Amino acid sequence: GTLLCVPPILHGTQSLASAIGYGYFYAISFLSTNGLMLQEEIPFHNGSELLLIVLAIIGGCMGSAAGGFRISRVLVLISLAWTELLRTLHPRMVIAVHQGGEVVPLHSAGRILVLAFLFAAVFSAGALLIALAGLSPIETITLTVSCLTTTGGVASLADLNTAAVLPSWTKFICTLLMILGRIEIFAFFLFIGSLLEETGHNW
């Protein structure tokens, strides 16, 4: 919210109260994956849209109804990256991944890494397929993030306020991405795996 407030204040395009109001409102709106918009044109400077997209991808807290990758998982990934960096510099050092003052088990950190890979893979595949509809790169990215994080306002950042003009197959892909984003990728693949096991095919 503070990062969103600073550019309008420095450039003098908004008053202090207005910049703080808009900045924190949109930060909470996108981080909680509600995507609520106050008006059609967001009164921010270049780069703010990218920050809002990142907030939507991060998403809410674990256990909440928000979408996105979840804040706690991002913190574990950051801690894991820092731990691996220290281990590279000091190979004999024994380092554990911590979050909230507690040690994160290696199997839990491994699952988060797998989930991050699946999230990136689904995002990339979905974006490539949606791009075939003739959308611009920024429209493709915002629409993919909007569907996968269930944050409707992200698509509005690229002035893509409706999906009615898109081909039917693109709407089907968007629908699939919305389902993946809402029930989460792990749960979706576990469901598909259970269906395949019931038919006698173990994948």
Image (cartoon, grey):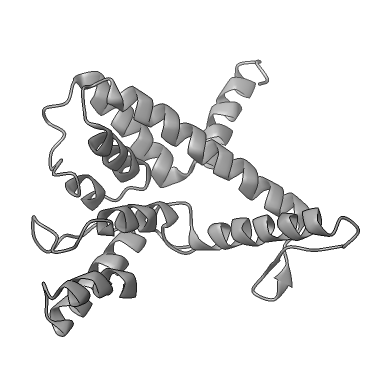
Q: Nearer the viewer, residue 81 or 35?
A: 81
Q: Quadrant of residue 173?
A: top left
Q: Nearer the viewer, residue 81 or 76?
A: 81
Q: Residue furthest left?
A: 40
Q: Position of residue 144 (x, y in %)?
A: 32, 38
Name the quadrant of the N terminus.
bottom left
Q: How many marks?
A: 0
Name the residue located 23 percent from the left edge and 22 percent from the top edge: 133
Q: Nearer the viewer, residue 84 or 63?
A: 84
Q: Is residue 199 above or below residue 102?
A: above
Left or right of 131 on screen, residue 61 = right
Q: Quadrant of residue 139?
A: top left
Q: Nearer the viewer, residue 155 or 188?
A: 155
Left or right of 181 on screen, residue 155 = left
> Can residue 32 be seen in the rendering of this structure?
no
> Can residue 181 be seen in the rendering of this structure?
yes
Q: Position of residue 183 (x, y in %)?
A: 44, 44
Name the residue located 26 percent from the left edge and 54 percent from the top edge: 49
